[in-house]
Amino acid sequence: MKEDKYPWSREVPLECVQETLGEQVPKTRADIQRGRQAFAAILDRYDPGVVFYGGCYDLAFMRAIARDTVKSGRASILMGDSTRADHPRRPWVEYGKRLLLRGAYDGAICAGTRSRDYLISLGFDDRKMWNGFDAVDSDHFAAGATEARSNPSTHRERLGLPPEYALCVARHSPEKDIDSLLQACSRVFRDRTSCSLVLCGTGPLTENLRLSAERLGIADRVRFVGWTSYNELPFYYGLASVTVLPSISEPWGLVVNESLACGTPVIASDVCGCVPELIRRGISGYTFPAGDSAELESVLRGVLHFGLGENVISQCQAIVKPWSLRNRTLGIVDCMREFGALGVIEGLSDCIARNSF
């Protein structure tokens, strides 16, 4: 059934090779061959002009069906936001990736300058690359944050939030390095007696982080919220003094988009992929060397004490504005137009031009 606002059906038939072969990506030679045959049938049935592949270029099956797509005369597009800083990169491994990717993809959808640069190092043509993802619904986050700030005492009481706090929205896993944030806070809190840390998220290290907070003597100043709903997140961002993303590996960092859309500045480690686009020193936030809790302490102390000016909300929202769902979708539309999928996208591009979302 079609909707008036958008020229596409609400119910779109989807088919997945994993449904044909089971829950696991094919890895054996026989399973890969069966998977390729199943995927070929899907291509014949729907006859797409462009096929987008969501990462996983290191899997033999994904490379195989990407090459099959190219051989069938269709465009094969990799969607990737990996950067050089994601993991330690060994030159011989990167050279091997470059060889393996040869002939598998016609272009790429990337997230920003760091993912673009990395894909170029793997042999992708800069002229066949578009920014097309790692965006959030900024209006949703801005609206919730505005509501939170319109009646802060009511929402602080409702959510059990302290009068001043730094916020971290992240999975409790090793690559997020929340322990470094706890160490930094333990020193900042000594002379910032009204400040607390609020952690939204869960993960395998939750209990370890609780123990770390106790060992550091700040258990009563750290609130573990757990999983937080999409509708509640803007309230946590909107009432926070600053959001911190201390990751030691982070391809992009969508929580930075979310926080800035709420008008809340961000302190992010320098490995976060979004840093060149979204972190403007002293305007939308600051960076620090990943894993350096002493430098994080210094930056956090400065932001809590001095802030980023009376226009910080509008500053943050202006910086993240170009990273809207509308603009990211236009990148995908431009890619499809480049490869001749005009019949598919004319109505879509007209709709995007008329609507912001």
Image: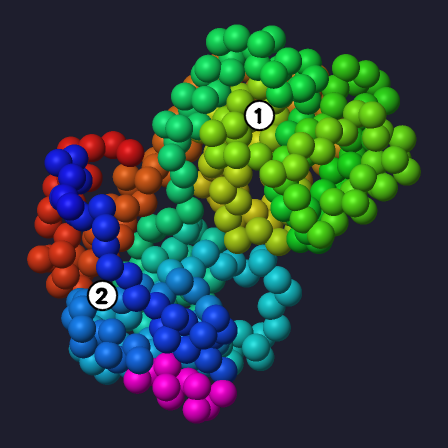
Q: Main secondary structure of the magenta part?
A: helix
- Residue 241: x %, y % from top left: 62, 21
- Say which residue appears at 41% left-offset and 38% top-offset: 136
Q: Quadrant of residue 325?
A: top left
**Quadrant assignment for the C terminus:** top left
- Say which residue appears at 61% left-offset and 73% top-offset: 90
Amino acid type, residue under disc 2 in the picture: Val
Count of numbered labels shown in the rendering: 2
Amino acid type, residue under disc 1 in the picture: Tyr
Closer to viewer: mark 2 or mark 1 = 1
Q: Quadrant of residue 166?
A: top right
Q: Residues within 10 Å of mark 1 (few under 14, many from 20)?
A: many
Q: In the image, is residue 200 part of the stretch drawn in magenta?
A: no
- Residue 102: x %, y % from top left: 37, 79
Using the rendered image of the protein, determine whether residue 283 is visible from the camera's viewpoint.
Answer: no
Using the rendered image of the protein, determine whether residue 135 is visible from the camera's viewpoint.
Answer: yes
Return the residue at label 1.
236
Look at the picture and state if 197 lies above or below 269. above
Q: Is residue 96 left or right of residue 78?
A: right
Return the residue at label 2.
50
Q: Nearer the viewer, residue 20 or 201?
A: 20
How far is disc 2 from disc 1 in space, using C-alphas? 40 Å
Magenta residues span 28-37
Q: Secondary structure at mark 1?
A: helix
